[in-house]
Amino acid sequence: MADVQPLRALHYALDRTGGLQPVVAPPYDVIYTEGRTALLEQSPYNVVAIDLPMADDGGDPYEHAASTLAEWRNDGVVVQDAQPALWPLEQEFVGPDGRSRKRRGFLARVRVEDYGPGRIRPHERTHPGPKEDRLRLTRATRVNLSPIFALYSDPAQDAWRALAAATDGPCWAETTDPDGTVNRLWRVDDMSAINMVQEALARAELLIADGHHRYETARVYADEVGGEGAHRYVLMCLVALQDQGLTVFPTHRLVRNLSQAQWDALDDALERNFTMSRLDRLEELPPAENQRLELGYLDARTRTPYRLTLRDQAVADAAMPGRSDPYRRLDTAVTEALLLKGALGLTDEQIDHLDGLGYARDDQQAIDSVLNGDYEAALFMAPTPVQRVQDVAESGESMPPKSTYFFPKVPTGMLFNPLVD
């Protein structure tokens, strides 16, 4: 079972920073250099100064992050709570599909465990690159700067109901993301409410939705330090699988630098394994969530949109021997097995390092990437139902990279979890 605990959080002193808005940031892996600069122009205390550190003198960026955080703490810009608390978070947003929703969860610290049934499961394979960067940053700062986003099953919504009364009052802080998502954060240190949350999650299994690299980094770091202590826990934002605002959006596949032999193999695989129906409009390319396995397809040769429908599930099953039934019914897995690996011959290493492969979470971005020549073909995925994500995880497997897009992201900088007692 997952060990979920309140935390004595480190957080910004809002009277010193002008609120939380100037100092929060998106997760590190979606920020580019110009974005980092813009965030620091909002405030010199913006979290990117320590989450994406750069030493002005060319020194060690990780040590620079550690010294900057220590300076902020000494100056009272970042403070630590005297009492442990849970932190309810409400995110009001408009999704990529244009619908308005509210997603509710809470921030806590969770004991780091090996992956396994009844404890914590991953849901996607991860790219190898970022883990070393996050590990070096954790060693230097000895805090979790950004929460992992994880899911748990709570059909009666008992955990949120235990915290809901606190959300009737004024929130501790509110921020608005560049995409318009409004984040409202409350602090709950009432032990009766905390105990009710812990009882609701007493037998819960956690499924990591976003932040696999950070979780695996936390596991390595905990084992490096050894023994017991705060380093055995990691900061998480926990959301119920049954929350009405929890939605999964697709991530589309883009390919480029195809040889003539690869084009020929792709054409053959499409004709052999899929029925192809011409679409009237480019906007119809993203498939809707349904029982049939369908893809959208657009390439730079004809610039014509098509709907691909798998002819026979047995074809996909044969291409993925040893895989579970839930895995073999994923459009991302079928695309990888039959097209990316089967037709184009991409290896796991090429896929992990984006060699000839790209991703797009926005429908129009994927279309434009082909029409403007950045990529030669695009494969459009359907949204993956949350239940299917859970089914794959329960089968003991991890989905292909970028199989899901949980929106919105959880901002970095709302809270920090100290890894020393």
Image (cartoon, rainbow, N blue to C red):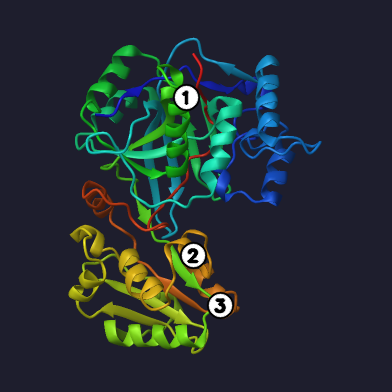
Q: In the visual, does 255 lie left or right of 322?
A: right
**Residue 128 in the image: above or below residue 87:** below
Which quadrant is the N terminus positioned in? top left
In the rendered image, which residue does mark 2 sit on? Answer: 350
Q: Residues within 10 Å of mark 2 (few under 14, many from 20)?
A: few
The residue pinned by badge 1 equals: 170
Q: Nearer the viewer, mark 3 or mark 1?
A: 3
Q: Amino acid at mark 1?
A: Pro
- Locate residue 104, reporting x and y percent: 37, 37
Residue type at mark 3 is Asn
Gap between marks 1 and 2, in whole Å? 49 Å
- Work out whether mark 3 precedes mark 1 in sequence or the reverse, and give the earlier one: 1
* Percent position of residue 5, x then y: 36, 21
In the rendered image, which quarter is residue 91 located in? top left
Q: CA distance from mark 3 to mark 1?
A: 54 Å
Disc nearest the viewer among 1 and 2 = 2
Q: Is residue 63 left or right of residue 191?
A: right
Q: Residue at x 43, y 77 (%)?
A: 344
Q: Which mark is residue 257?
A: 3
Which three-letter amino acid code belongs to the residue tagged 2?
Gln
Picture layout, residue 351 above or below residue 318: above
Mark 1 Cα within 10 Å, few/some/many (few <14, many 20+)? few
Q: Is residue 79 left or right of residue 255?
A: right
Q: Is residue 318 left or right of residue 359?
A: left
Earlier residue among tags 1 and 2: 1
Q: Is residue 314 visible?
A: yes
Evaluate whether residue 412 shows in this view. no
Asked which quadrant contains residue 163, the reply is top left
- Circle 2 sits in a helix, a strand or a loop, which is it? helix
* Kind of element beneath mark 3: loop
Residue at the spot 25% in from the left edge and 28% down from the top edge: 201
Dot 3 crowding, Cα within 10 Å, few <14, some 14–19, many 20+: few
